[in-house]
Image (tube, rainbow, N blue to C red):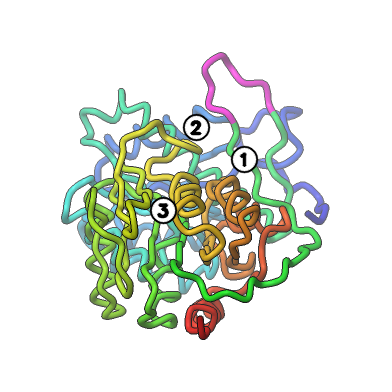
Amino acid sequence: MTTAAAPSPVAGMRPGIRSAAPFRIMVVDDSAVIRGLLTRSLEADPDLAVVASVGDGQQAINALQRHDIEIVILDIEMPVMDGLTALPKIIAMKPGLPVLIASTLTMRGATVSLKALSLGAADYVTKPGSSALTTAEDFKRELLGKVKGLAQARRHARGEPMPSPAKRGEGAPAPAPLPVRPGEIKLRPMPIERPDVVAIGSSTGGPQALFRLLKALGPIKQPLLITQHMPATFTTILAEHIVRLTGLAAAEGVDGEPVVGSRVYIAPGDYHMTVEAQGTERRLQLSKGPPENFCRPSVDPMLRSLTQAYGRRVLCAILTGMGSDGLKGAQALVAAGAAVVAQDEKSSIVWGMPGAVATAGLCSAVLSIDELGPFIAKIAGRVA
């Protein structure tokens, strides 16, 4: 990462604690109670500062003209101007500004969140009711992790300094992992065999990346397995969106169902999805085994199982996402002679997962999201 001079500290920041300002956040929610709870949760971390807190989309647009914002947390249902109306206006005003949607864990919340992601939101968090927010530790950890991950990725891409380490009180949240540092990427030769199965792993920014890739990919003869980090309900809606946007036969995986060609299987929220060979058949297995890489579903279990079930005849694509889920599974695939490709840094919301496999020397190609679909179609269509 290039070195840049530290910006001036924000107002109220204690001198001498860090050389660069904390990440600057705007909270947009029509409930003053929820805005207050979100602000307290965020500012419990010394790397985060809420510099604007407003009650509707129009106020958010006005605040963007007055404040230098790095992350927006945007509610959907608000008076005057709702989140879906405000979202494209915010993105047009500040291209590249990550917007994190805050929605409820309901079918409607999932539907609206997927719509927001298709309009350019970077990610989402599912918030509990206002009465539960004060005790929802899982929500707070998810909120802090996603906010810091997106903010770090943005500064990293712009060559700006991160907040310097500060002393943390006991029980304070750990810092989010930094995005992968760019380095020389050494590509492996692409195996010559046609794959018998295609697998995709994705997280932050994944839904919009999946939509673009699958549209360009079109129908293929192989089964296509997808693990996207999402909770239950959201993966149901994701499958419906894929069907509507691409025309592919897509659905959440069902425990025990046979894996057949030309179908898209999506790991259901809160379940690891793996494949097991049973005689001449391969069947899906769903489990609530321990989370891996803090995730369930996780990409690694899926890839490990494909190594066992298909050997070297697997083509795996790792798309945008925080962390390094998929790295260990990709290592197992490559050791078996299978192929791994990854989304490039420029087209990724966060180059964590794809950057991990790319910089580890596991990839046979590192391409933009718009190049990946045609590339996979070409490899999948090879003569056996």
Q: Amino acid at mark 2?
A: Glu
Q: Regarding mark 2 in the picture, which secondary structure is present there?
A: helix
Q: Can residue 83 be seen?
A: no
Classify mark 1: helix, strand or loop. Answer: loop
Residue 52: image location, x then y, percent: 45, 47
Q: Is residue 242 left or right of residue 45?
A: left
Query: Dividing the picture into quarters, in which one does residue 221 lie?
Result: bottom left
C-beta proximity under 8 Å, tags 1 and 2 = no
Q: Position of residue 105 (x, y in %)?
A: 23, 45
Q: Report which residue position mark 1 lands on.
A: 177
Amino acid type of disc 1? Answer: Pro
Q: Is residue 365 above or below residue 272?
A: below
Q: Earlier in the sequence, mark 1 or mark 2?
A: 2
Residue holding disc 2: 43
Q: Residue at x 57, y 74 (%)?
A: 193
Q: How many marks?
A: 3
Q: Is residue 265 left or right of residue 361?
A: left
Q: Which quadrant: the N terminus?
A: bottom right
Say whether residue 191 is magenta: no
**Residue 62 in the image, given as x and y percentages of width and height:** 42, 62
Whether residue 100 is situated above or below residue 120 in the rendered picture: above
Mark 3 or mark 1: which comes first in sequence? 3
Residue shown at 36% from the left, 49% from the top:
276
**First of labels 2, 3 by sequence position:** 2
Picture quadrant of residue 238: bottom left
